């Protein structure tokens, strides 16, 4: 079987708008986000494997999502280019990853994270809800060949998604 790469695209969990004067980059998670992110982390671990590398927006809500996922990944990079990134910037970041990583996660923001999931996964995703995780398998051994490599959206999960029959546990 040919080598594959697994890319997890994550939209940060639900953020708070309770402090109207706060800068957007400093908005924290709200109560729902603090509840949903650990649940999504449990789902990621249950499906396995967890990513070997995580690229995360420096926005507070993204960093809090990362912490609340509880994945225990040692290789984490906060990259300011992810905050307010275009989808092409996100794609360039993915394509620049070191090939030693078989799996990576990118924690970012809409609309670019939804666009990237749609483009790479081959399935139209107009809007990833907060806390959503799109898992994409790329049929390549080189991240730089992400575009043009056969890809498959192997999972699309989000906090309000009902469990599949028989998968409640």
Image: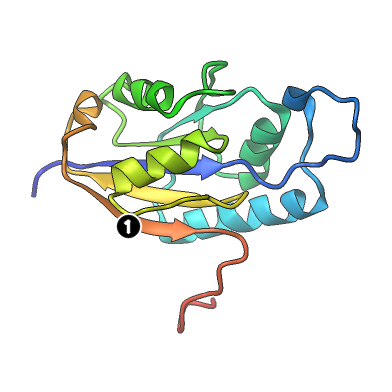
Q: Residues within 10 Å of mark 1 (few under 14, many from 20)?
A: few
- The residue that mark 1 highlights is 154
Choose top left, top right, bottom left or bottom right for residue 155: bottom left
Left or right of residue 141: residue 56: right
Query: Image point 57% across, 35% down: which residue?
Result: 109
Considering depth in this image, is 6 or 82 the residue closer to the camera?
82
Q: Position of residue 94 (x, y in %)?
A: 35, 27
As drawn, the residue found furthest toward the left would be 1
Left or right of residue 34: residue 161: left
Query: Image point 63% across, 22% down: which residue?
Result: 58
Considering depth in this image, is 116 or 98 the residue closer to the camera?
116
Choose top left, top right, bottom left or bottom right for residue 66: top right
SS for dot 1: strand
Q: Position of residue 63 (x, y in %)?
A: 66, 31
> Which of the image's four quarters has the C terminus?
bottom right
Query: Image point 79% across, 35% down: which residue?
Result: 28
Left or right of residue 149: residue 45: right
Q: Is residue 44 above or below residue 89?
A: below
Q: Position of residue 110 (x, y in %)?
A: 56, 38
């Amino acid at each position: 079987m040919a080598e594959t790469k697994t890319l997890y695209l994550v939209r940060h969990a639900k953020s708070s708008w309770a402090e109207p004067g706060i800068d957007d980059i400093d908005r924290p998670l709200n109560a729902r986000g603090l509840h949903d992110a650990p649940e999504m982390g449990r789902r990621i671990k249950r499906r396995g494997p967890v990513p070997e590398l995580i690229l995360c927006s420096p926005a507070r809500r993204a960093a809090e999502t990362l912490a609340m996922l509880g994945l225990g990944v040692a290789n984490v990079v906060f990259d300011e280019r992810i905050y307010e990134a275009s989808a092409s910037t996100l794609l360039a970041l993915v394509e620049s990853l070191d090939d030693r990583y078989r799996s990576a996660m990118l924690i970012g923001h809409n609309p670019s994270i939804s666009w990237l999931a749609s483009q790479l996964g081959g399935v139209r995703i107009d809007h990833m809800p907060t806390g959503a995780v799109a898992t994409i398998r790329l049929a390549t051994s080189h991240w730089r060949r992400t575009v043009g490599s056969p890809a498959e959206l192997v999972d699309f999960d989000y906090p309000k998604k009902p469990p599949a029959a028989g998968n409640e546990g």
